[in-house]
Structures are given as C-alpha cells and as structure tokens.
Image (tube, rainbow, N blue to C red):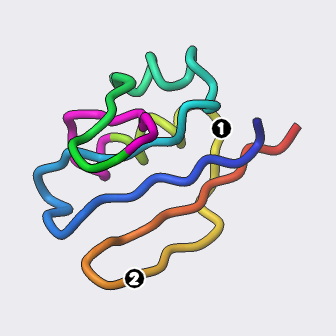
Amino acid sequence: MPYVVICCLIRTEAGPTICGGADSDADLMEYLGASLVTRAGNNFPQWVAPTCPAMVLDKLESCGYTLVTCAGTGQTIVWTLHKSA
C-alpha cells in the first residue's frame, strides 16, 4: 500500500496517533507500534499508536514514506504520506 493516512485528535504533542484502518499493512502498523482497537461509539477498528504523531512520522520517513499533504479538519489534524515503488 503506497499511501498512509494518519491523524491525531486535538493533542498532537502527546498522542495517541491513529495510523490506519483495519485493512492497513499489519507489518507496517506493528513497526509503528500501533494496535488494532475499536473505540467506544465506533463500529469499526483502527490502528492506534500510543506515541505522538511526530514519532510516527519519523518512523514512516525511515521506511521511505514522504509527506504529501497535511490538513486540519475541526479538531483533527491529518497527514497523508506516500512511498514510491
């Protein structure tokens, strides 16, 4: 999967960081330290890393991903990254 979308709600300095949905690459998610969880009120699982977004972004960069875009939506910040083949 060449694209990864990560996001964080409100507190970007502390985490947790949402790293993907249930179909995300499990090996990459394990490398990021993420666990597959279903949060209260959701009927879908997400990969969530306990670390801050900066640490997740650093790990993704070390795997060859580059930042494509960043956006703020409400109280959520979203980063999209891409890895060239």
Give the camera-side residue of 22 and 26: 22
Q: Which residue is mark 2?
A: 73
- 83, above or below 38, in the image: below
- 64, above or below 41, in the image: above
Give yes or no for contact between labels 2 and 1 (Cβ–Cβ under 8 Å). Answer: no
- Secondary structure, mark 2, is strand
Which amino acid is tagged 2? Thr
Task: Residue 69 in the image: state x and y as whole percent.
Answer: 59, 73
| Range covered by the magenta-colored residues | 43-55
Q: Which residue is mark 1?
A: 64
Residue situated furthest right in the rendering: 85
- 22, above or below 83, in the image: above
Where on the picture, by quarter, is residue 35? top left
Residue for point 26% across, 50% down: 41
| Residue 46: mark | none
- Characterize the local packing of mark 1: few (<14), some (14-19) or many (20 or more) Cα atoms within 10 angstroms: few
Residue for point 41% across, 27% down: 32
Residue 28 is covered by the magenta coloring? no
Where on the picture, by quarter, is residue 55? top left
Q: Please give left or right for residue 58 compared with residue 22 in the image.
A: left
Task: Residue 17 in the image: state x and y as whole percent.
Answer: 30, 47
Task: Residue 78 in the image: state x and y as whole percent.
Answer: 44, 67
- Secondary structure, mark 1, is loop
Residue for point 41% across, 42% down: 43
Which amino acid is tagged 1? Gly
Q: Label 2 vs label 1: CA separation?
A: 26 Å
- Foreground mark, 2 or 1, reads 2
Quarter holding the N terminus is top right
Residue for point 88% across, 37% down: 85
Q: Earlier in the sequence, mark 2 or mark 1?
A: 1
